[in-house]
Image: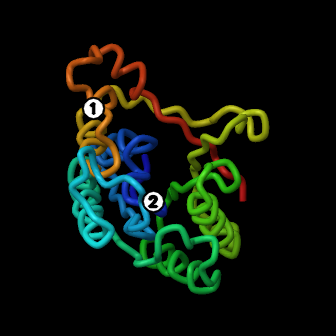
Amino acid sequence: MEQRILVVLPHPDDEAFGLSGTLAKYISQGAQVTYACLTLGEMGRNMGIPPFATRVTLPEIRKKELEQSCRAIGIQDLRMLGFHDKTIEFEDQEQLDGRISALLTELNPSLVITFYPGFSVHPDHDACGAAVIRTIGTMPEEHRPLVHCLAFSNNHEQSIGKPDVIIDVKDFLNAKMESIKAHRSQFQAAELLGNGKLSDKEIQDRFGTERFWTYAI
């Protein structure tokens, strides 16, 4: 069982769809989870439906949404690292890697979860994953944590194969749906929120499994 997990993702809401159920499951088994969120997603285009945020208020709104999502999942330790949205690929690598390295040293996680570089669609996702992989690659081999990656680009399975870690999170769908709902400025599609249009079985089929790729470093 994983005792200490470090999640490194660039945006508030990155945790909601792909791994909130997995994190809730690990936490129920006693794991301590730290979520290092690189930015506040302040350049997001969505402002709610109908809009309730502005470009000025969006960072604070997304910060509160992130905190609410983490409470829903049960995440004990949220770190907001203060990088700027949509610039991760341009950040000074030494600074970025240094922040990640400091977390690895402080927390000594047995498992790190991030995006699979090159197969995660958004430049921030790919740059975040690349920084995590790069940083862990500098560690002595015997001290490197296990790394699980999220991937969802078109045709990604043709390049990296099928996921080798598949987590059944059906017993944790309440936490997952509350995590998704927390990000009101990003997601308000009623069919995603289980407002009665989807049956319990449809929600389980759509959201009840989470998939990861173990990254060999």
Q: Amino acid at mark 1?
A: Leu
Question: Is there CB contact under 8 Å for labels 1 and 2?
Answer: no
> In 3D space, how far apart are the residues under numbered discs 1 and 2 (Cα atoms)?
24 Å
User: Residue 81 placed where, x, y %?
Assistant: 41, 76
Among numbered discs 1 and 2, the one appearing first in the sequence: 2
Question: Badge 2: how crowded within 10 Å, few (<14), some, or many (20+)?
Answer: many
The front one of 90 and 71 is 90
User: Residue 161 placed where, x, y %?
Assistant: 73, 35
Q: Nearer the viewer, mark 1 or mark 2?
A: 1
| Residue visible at 25% across and 42% down in the picture | 181
Q: Answer left or right for 30 relative to 107.
A: left
The front one of 41 and 156 is 41
Question: Badge 1: how crowded within 10 Å, few (<14), some, or many (20+)?
Answer: some
Image height of 169 relative to 183, above or below: above
Residue 33 numbered tag: none
Q: Answer left or right for 85 relative to 195.
A: right
Q: Which residue is mark 2?
A: 7
User: Residue 167 placed where, x, y %?
Assistant: 47, 33
Residue 193 numbered tag: 1
| Residue visible at 40% across and 28% down in the picture | 207
Q: How many marks?
A: 2
Image height of 142 relative to 172, above or below: below
| Residue visible at 61% across and 49% down in the picture | 120
Image height of 35 relative to 2, above or below: below
The quarter of the displayed image where residue 66 is located: bottom left
The quarter of the displayed image where residue 58 is located: bottom left
The local secondary structure at tag 2 comes to: strand
